[in-house]
Amino acid sequence: MEKNFGIENETRKHIGMVSNLISCMVNELLMRSITHDSSKLEEPECSIFEQYSESYKNAIVGSQEKKDILVNMKPAFDHHLKVNRHHPEYFVLNNKDLKLEHAISQFSVIDLIQMFLDWIATSKRQNLNTFDFLDSMAKKYNLNVQLLQIFRNTIPILDQYLNNIKTVANLTQECDEIFAMNNNTVNHFDSSGQLVETETINK
């Protein structure tokens, strides 16, 4: 059968175009990864979060103390939501005619991915069940069933990736410990497997 070079060329052009578009998305997401929540490191957010975050975390849910702390933190939260477009509130604060339950319809795919990953990271940091947390966010922001299921389908992929990172970190730590024992040193690691100190010992 004679080869149809026209179809092959068109297919290769299509592959190239999709590859370029994927690279575009990846570059945009990389930029988001660098700038994510960076407003928390600047005023007017930085000093407020620095002052109240620990007490807010330790306050009892629903208590008057927690409510009072939230009032004091409101200027920081309001600013954060107004300048970070991966939060649905961003679009509400910048468009008074928009309701929160419709805000995600203003998202780009980039915004959506960043928001989803932000939710996952938050659930991990707070030791919450990721699926339950995702369901609560879906109710809050009126996510449709299909999008919610797509998010749920993605969680095991991310969990597998995070588990692989932990495995590599643990193996690296074990290898470093063996090497250190043979060189009269003791390495001290943090909870993520990062080396924080090397101590020389006398045998």
Image (spheres, rainbow, N blue to C red):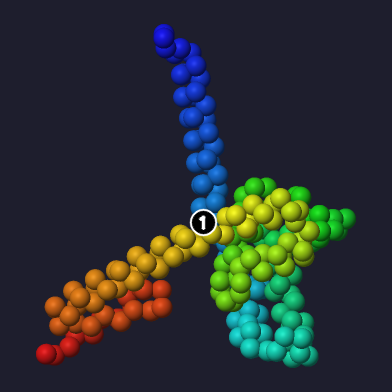
Specify the farthest residue to the top: 2
The residue beneath circle 1 is: 157
Indicate whether 26 appears above or below 116.
Answer: above
Nearer to the camera, 176 or 64:
176
Name the quarter where the C terminus is drawn: bottom left
The amino acid type found where label 1 is placed reads: Ile
Residue 54, quarter of the rendered image: bottom right
Q: How many marks?
A: 1
User: In percent of the image, x 76 and y 53: which residue is there?
Assistant: 144
Position of 153 compared to 195: left or right? right
Q: Position of residue 86 (x, y in %)?
A: 66, 58
Q: Residue at x 68, y 89 (%)?
A: 59
**Residue 174 in view, yes or no:** yes
Which quadrant of the figure contains the N terminus?
top left
Residue at x-position 76% and y-position 86% = 62
64 sits left or right of 35 in the view: right
Horizontal and vertical percent for residue 83? 69, 61
The residue sitting at the front extreme is 1
Task: Give neighbour class at mark 1: few <14, some 14-19, many 20+ (Cα, 10 Å).
Answer: few
